[in-house]
Amino acid sequence: MKRLLTFCCIAAMTLNLLAQHEEELWINCGEKKIYGVLNKLDDGKKKHPIAIIAHGFNGTHAYGRNYFEPLRELGYECYTFDFPCGSVHSRSDNNTMEMSVLDEQRCLEAIIRHFRSRPDVDANNVVLIGESQGGLVSALTAASMPKAISRLILCFPALCIPDNWNSRYPNLSDIPDTTRVWDVPLGRRFFEEVHTLKPFDVIARYKRPVLIVQGDADRVVSMDDSRKAVAMYRKARLHVIKGAGHGFKGEELKEQFREMKKFLTAKKPE
């Protein structure tokens, strides 16, 4: 009996490994090239829904790997990538002096167009997942392409970025050539662009379901902004993880994934 159970476990693990594989995928965005990793499912189906994961400030595609397993269980393929100039570790481009929220939005839009044009992707089931600054970018992108995104998940979204930096640099003339944020150098352009960026004026253009997940001990992103966003969206829910800060780990991450699974499997409201 023990041998049989061991054999069954090994067989199940082998089938699980065969059911998916990862491949590096570069996507063009104008003159920029975006590096990413696509987690594909090999289950015989011609089309799959896809989740696109946008990392936060100075993050990389590595953060998105956390989503592979829980989303695979729901039948989703995943694409996680490096924003060009989005990190000192970016494989797309690590020149953070050229970091730009608007460039990141354009890159995310290019990624969405790429996958919606693929014959192996269900173009009616493209999910955006954005963390922190990637959450801001995802919210802006969903507002600019509201019919292209089926559901939107924002994890501790940094919708506060424009207000935070405008309070530090109230006038364009106040912006220095270089600002170091958590020891990451940023150029003037980043702050000049967010000077006129007003996320709350545009995000509600996205009318489809939204889930926001945030910790109540987050010292980087205000809970008030997430509550304000939920009130503005037509179909949105805020899940608060008690004691969690800016970013989740361990049991907090498991709680996030439980909420994500409930959100993605729930019947879409009319």
Image (tube, rainbow, N blue to C red):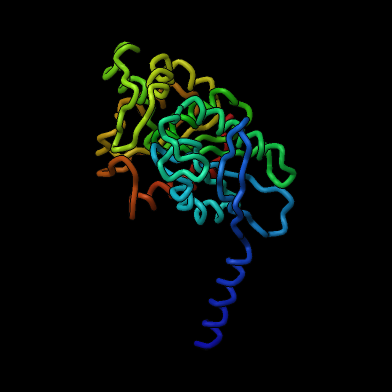
Q: Does 128 sit left or right of 218 as displayed? A: right
Q: Quadrant of residue 51?
A: top right
- Furthest residue to the front? 177
What x and y, as percent, mark residue 145?
A: 60, 26
What x and y, as percent, mark residue 253?
A: 37, 50
User: Which residue is at a point 61% across and 32% down the rendered structure image?
Assistant: 31
Q: Quadrant of residue 241?
A: top left
What x and y, as percent, mark residue 226?
A: 36, 29
Q: Quadrant of residue 220?
A: top left
Q: Does 30 sit left or right of 83 as displayed? A: right
User: Which residue is at a point 57% across and 40% down the rendered structure image?
Assistant: 34
User: Which residue is at a point 43% across and 20% down the rendered structure image?
Assistant: 199
> Which quadrant would the C terminus be assigned to in this image?
top right
Whether 186 is drawn above or below 165: the answer is: below
Q: Does 209 sit left or right of 89 as displayed? A: right
Whether 1 is drawn above or below 208: the answer is: below
What x and y, as percent, mark residue 140?
A: 50, 25
Whether 59 is drawn above or below 207: the answer is: below
Please tell me how many numbered marks the rendered image carries: 0
